[in-house]
Amino acid sequence: MPQTTTQSKYTTVSIPITLHDRIEKMIIKKSGFKSVSDYVTYVLREVVAMHETKDIPEPFTSTDVEEIKARLKALGYL
Amino acid sequence: MSLTPHGGRLVSVSTFEKSPEKSKELAENSTVQVSRETMVQMFNISTGVLSPLTGFMGRADYENVIDSMRLSNDTPWTIPVLLHVPETFNAGGGDEITLVDDSGNPVGLLTFEELFSISKKDYVKKVFGTEDEAHPGVAKTYASSDRAVAGRLKSVMRFDKGPFENYTLSPKETRVLFKEKGWKDIIAFQTRNAPHIGHEYVQKTGLAFADGIFINPVLGKKKSGDFTDEVILETYQALVKNYYPKNSVVLSVLHYEMQYAGPKEAIMHAIMRKNFGCTHIAIGRDHAGVGSYYGPYAAHEIFKEFPDLGIQAVFFREFFYCNKCAGIANEKICPHLESDRLTFSGTKLRKMFQAGETPPKEFMRPEVSQVILKSKTPFVE
């Protein structure tokens, strides 16, 4: 179970101190991130989203598609 | 495979037709009267425009949205979608609530989940960034109840789109359409105006790299002085017919009431267009802004906070006509003075049309101007 803060909106994960220091040095030089936590959150959201979008099936069946195509043709879109 | 809907799935809620039998069937439940705007939101939830929402938000989502710009499962979301109810309203867990229009006709069925209160002051500060009641979004919030009902929409009455039925496509339909057209990169263009040359250049710059453009004008309640819905659609039809290559544009309307929440609304505009299947969205100057509440490019900045939004924003500086360049330019590519530039001012345009004048062709295409001049009521009163 993650250790949560009193506000229950944040939790602590461990990363190597060496990595933490590298990120800290980098974000001091490059503006845009207020803290190592902000940076790590940003990167993780990007990576997680990339994985989540894989293998999601089409949101309609082949029957849906035929009905939709018929309406689109009738309206002049196809 | 098409672009993933926001939150991973495209929501679909069943619809019913208006009938005496349905009215009788739903009359047993407690009722909540809803506004036209809420009916529009219900329609957008039912067709998946607001995916992954399946109904009106509960407290956890509400608080996370206003505090962190995300739903409680971390999905990006910047403006709450609430069903406000009167102070006296009461219901129990699992109850079904019939949503009715102002004539008492059932327009939807909601499974009750939660009743909660909000601080309107907190809401306006966090969503609109101001407590100024001159801001239309703030005024509307203060005029609404501070009690909200959360619940999943079980079914909704078929939405009356008036004269725009044939120009309203659902996300399922646009996704099939884009696929049939063989488009992979699709740029969305959000608008609430008749198009001037500046708009056209934003669209065509986007089209230069995309396979197609999805022009998606917002129809619904607007501010006094805005173009009417009919004029917006007809002017775009004139523009597309005369100035765009065939098979490069899909023109379809979005029923939606503007919030004028500037940058936060820009994110919502992107989410909705992602659900329609777009890969990109054009974000211009003062997107979804009103008055001077937001910086001219605040809507560009906010996208940096969402690496997981799943739709790419394409940012545009303001276009203008430069006499020395002898063409359309923007400040990134034009070195000339302000005095050499003709800016596309909506106020100036409105005054010209009110005086019955045709704007210069450097400002607006003649075919577009003609639609406005021929209209008896081009502007919202």
Image (tube, rainbow, N blue to C red):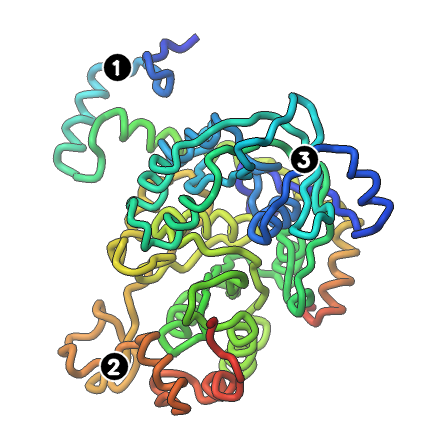
Judged from this view, the residue extending furthest toward the front is: B88
Which residue is the site of mark 2? B342
Q: Which residue is mark 1?
A: A16
Seen from the viewer's position, the closer of residues B130 and B247 is B130
Q: Earlier in the sequence, mark 2 or mark 3?
A: 3
On the picture, is A77 further left or further right than B145? right
Q: Chain of mark 3?
A: B
Q: Quadrant of residue A23?
A: top left
Label drawn at residue B110: 3
Which type of secondary structure does the marked residue at label 3 adopt? strand
In front: B327, or B150?
B150
Residue B106 in view of the camera: yes
Between circles 2 and 3, the one closer to the viewer is 3
Kindly tell me whether residue B73 is visible in this rendering. no
Q: Are marks 1 and 3 in contact (CB under 8 Å)?
A: no
Callout 1: SS: loop
Count the marks.
3
Protein chain holding label 2: B
Please state if B361 lies on the left or on the right of B20 as rendered. left
Amino acid under disc 1: Pro
Q: Amino acid at mark 2?
A: Leu
Of badges 1 and 3, nearer the viewer stands 3
> Where is residue B307 shown, x and y percent of the image?
37, 39
Q: Residues within 10 Å of mark 1 (few under 14, many from 20)?
A: few
Q: Is residue A37 above or below residue B98?
A: above
